[in-house]
Amino acid sequence: MRWNMSRKANQTVCCRQCAGEGIEECRFCAGTGMFKIGSELMVDPASGRPPPCPVCRGKGEEMCSRCNGVGRIASWLFKSERRQWKDDDDDNLSSGGGRR
């Protein structure tokens, strides 16, 4: 992984994880806002209704963990593309020719 180190530290880019919105779907309840364990929806015996998710408090969304809810990140934190490494100089080694 390569990091794009910009000389302009005050530049920001849109956060890719939340698409610039600063919020993302709650990972605990999968955006339902209701308390679930696995695929089972829990039900409060007193009310007969599912209790709210303890992480998002029933909203179904939480603050983005990458940008901390801002929607933008510093450009020098932005990961640049990975380059594919090509190993094409060992062809002679596998055929027994060795390097010359």
Image: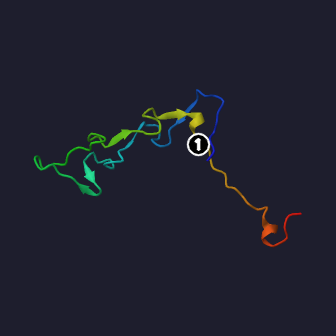
Residue at the (23%, 54%) spot, across then down: 41
Q: Is residue 37 left or right of residue 71?
A: left
Viewer-side residue, 93 vs 88: 93
Say if 98 sits above or below 68 in the image.
below
Q: Is residue 83 left or right of residue 92?
A: left
The x and y percentages for residue 42 are: 21, 52
Say if 20 sits above or below 48 in the image.
above
Viewer-side residue, 60 vs 39: 39
Pointer 1 local density, CA inside 10 Å: few below 14, some 14–19, many at least 20: few
Circle 1: element type: loop
The x and y percentages for residue 45 are: 12, 50
Q: Quadrant of the C terminus?
A: bottom right
The residue that label 1 is drawn on is: 79
Residue at the (43%, 37%) spot, across then down: 21
Q: Among all residues in the image, which is located at the extreme top? A: 10
Residue type, mark 1 in image: Lys
The x and y percentages for residue 80 are: 62, 44
Q: Is residue 64 left or right of residue 77?
A: left
Q: Is residue 9 left or right of residue 25?
A: right
Q: Please state the total of marks drawn on the protein image.
A: 1
